[in-house]
Structures are given as structure tokens and as C-alpha cells.
Image (cartoon, rainbow, N blue to C red):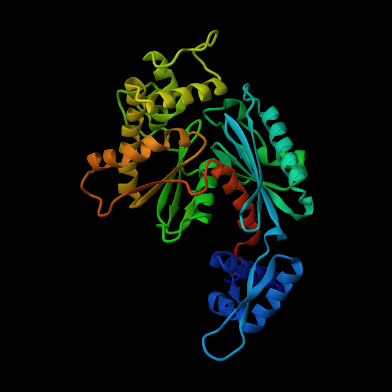
Amino acid sequence: MPRGANLPVIAAFNETVLLDAIRRSGSGLSRVELVGATGLSAQTVTNVSRRLLTQGLIREAGSRPVDGPGKPRTILQLEPTGSYAVGVHLDPTVITCVLLDLESAVVEHTRRHAPVSGDAAETVLLAADAVGEILERSGVERGRVRGIGVAAPGPIDAGTGVVVSPPLIPGWSGLRLRDELAAATGLPALVAKDVTAAAVAEHWRDPAGASGDFAFVYYGTGVGVGLVLANQVYTGASHNAGDVGHSIVDPGGALCSCGRRGCYGESVRPRQLVQQGIRDGVLSRPEGAGDDLDVETVDELFTALTAAADDGGFAAGRILDHSIANTSLYLTNLSALLDIDRVVFGGPYWGRVEARYLERLPLQLAEDDMGIMTHPLTIASSAVGDDVAAIGAACLVLDRAFSPRSNLT
């Protein structure tokens, strides 16, 4: 049975409907166009737009002539300074923090090394300090900031904002990330899985005409996949979709922590590729470093490995090409399963392998073609850039505040 709703709830919902229509239009819409785009009456559009103008969330931005007789129509656009959101991405290697305006443009940005120890409390303090830094530099009043979105390695408990036993950073198990960061900053917070946040950012910034069915391969300390299906970000029953690390792609490959060999995540993650480089003599183990390299050392050695491959080093190139072959095998199965036609890559480690992957992965996919796909699979780099997960986390805050979510039925 439909639930009733009071008038303030309806008014707030209508405001988000108008804001969403204006945001998606790009160049703005007139009130007449908003009537057609939203299905609301002309009087409702007039009343709601007046409230949004008073709140400083939209602005009148010139006029547009009409076809035939009649007065030019005033165009309504988002007011970028009307509201802001903070996005934080916590990767075991790096902490990224961004401030987005209402148009989802990056106003401020900072990046810091994560604690080498992986200590959860220290990570939260560094993240809170980064938030304070970008707000101070921007001069934005805290009252205009809707909140903080945090992208974290999964699995997560989305309802409580707790990080649940992340395999690559066991020290974060049970971390009450949402509540601790909210307490440290004084701003409301939400927590999302990093690959979900990355998919959200890519979906918000999607190139015009791009497919609404794609996978976002997030390449960081580990690898994960965010999914956009039928133009909607897919999160799964517990908001933990995207754990692809234990899909077997190379049965004779490296031993994974799960006890099996050839898991996709282990076959491509930078730490494993660096260790292979050391074993093959491409890289030198730093003096005094044990088998368990810290995150900063892995980062430096991965840069050296990819540079050696770019310079034509055969052994270094062979290591990266093996990761490309494993990625192709995984994507061939994924694309056949979900009938996606586009795969987007991004994340903090992607830039160092981007050129080689974009050149060689399509060739490998063609070689691995199982003959069941009825369309090609397009490979692309993120339209958002290295900070895709942090930007996506901030977009989630804006989306929660300003996208229409009807609970009227």
C-alpha cells in the first residue's frame, strides 16, 4: 500500500528533481524546458526554482531565444559555490583528499603517503588533517560542505561505515571509519567501497555518447572492478560488489594468500610484479629490505619496473605483458557474462602502465576472443584521472543530497 507523505517531503523531493535535471543538462534549462524534463507543473517549477534561487543552489544565467514569437527564456544553471563535498580515498599506499563544488569540479586537492605501518588510527588522523588542509586553503565555509565521502578498500559494512577485514591491510579490520572520521572533522561522513566510488565518478563524468554498460577496473595496491549496468552503478546486496581478486586466470601462477594459485588480483598487483622483477634480476632489492617490502618501496620499484619496460627492457616488458595476458583472460569472461562493451581503467598505479596496456590489451583480447561476443570491447582510460576514487566518494555525498530518491510510494 502506498505510504503517505507530508508536503515538506514532497517539496524537498521536487527540489532534487529540478536540481538533477539542471545538472544533467550541462548548459542549463529554462523553466519551460524543466516542465517537459521533469513532468512537474509550470506553477510547481516556478515555486521550486524560486526556492532554489533563494538557497543559492541555482542561478539565472542569461537567456535563450525561442523559435518564433515570444520572449527569450531565462536559463537556470547550477550555482557551483552553492554547496560542496569532500572526498577521501584511503589506499594502503596513498591518502587522497579532494573538495568538489556543486558541479563536481575539483576545487582543492591534496595527496599524502599513507602510514608505512598501516596503522588505522594514524591513517584516520592523517585523513582528517588533509580534510582540514583543503578546507582552509579553499576558504570554503564548513556550513556549505555537505559532508565527507570516504572510499576505502572492501569489504565494508555500508550501514555502519565499518571496514570489514580488508585482505591487504589486516590492521584496518573492524575500523569504524565513518564515525571516527566524522568525529575527527566535525562533518557527517559516509563510506563506500573504493571500486564503487570510482565507478560513480566515471559515471558522473561519462563522455557524451559512451555506453551505459561498462566495467571500471581500479588498479591500485590491489585490483577491483566497479560496474555500471543499464546506466546504474551496481553495488550488490551488501554494497561489496567488485571483489575480483580471486578469479583464477593462471593456474600455474603465483601462490595467493587464499591458498590457491593464479588468482587475478595476485597476478597483476604491483607488489607481485615487483617481486617478480627482483627474482628475474630486473630490479634490485633495497639494502636491508626483507621479503615483505613496505608500500613506499613497492611504489618506487614499480615505477622502476615500468620505466625499464618503457625503455625496451625485455625482461621487464615480459612481466607486464604477462599481467596484460591475465587481464585479457579475466575481461573476456567478464564481458561475456555481463554483455558489457566498454572497460575503463584508472587508479593510482594505472598511469604507469597505461600506454602499454592501451596498445597491447586490445590485441590480446582479439587473440582470446571466444567467438560468443556480438560486439567489440572498447578499452579506455578514466575520464576523471588518478583521483577517481576520491572524486567518486565526494560525488556520492552530492548524489545523496541532491539526487531524487522518492520514498513517497
Quadrant where the image shows the C terminus: bottom right
Residue 78 showing in the rendered view? yes
The picture places residue 282, in percent across and down from the top left corner, at: 39, 16
Residue at (67% x, 41% y) in the render: 178
Residue 261 showing in the rendered view? no
Quadrant where the image shows the N terminus: bottom right
Residue 99 position (above or below residue 1): above
Q: Residue furthest left?
A: 371
Residue 34 position (above or below residue 395): below
Q: Answer with the quarter of the image where residue 91 lies.
A: top right
Residue 278 position (above or below residue 149): above
- The foreground one among 60 and 204 is 60
The picture places residue 356, in percent across and down from the top left corner, at: 37, 35
- The foreground one among 242 and 309 is 309
Residue 316 position (above or below residue 13): above
The picture places residue 170, in percent across and down from the top left corner, at: 57, 26
Left or right of residue 237, residue 138 in this image: right
The picture places residue 278, in percent across and down from the top left corner, at: 42, 15
Q: Residue furthest bottom?
A: 69
Q: Answer with the quarter of the image where residue 28 lies.
A: bottom right
Left or right of residue 303, residue 156 in this image: right
Q: Residue furthest front?
A: 311
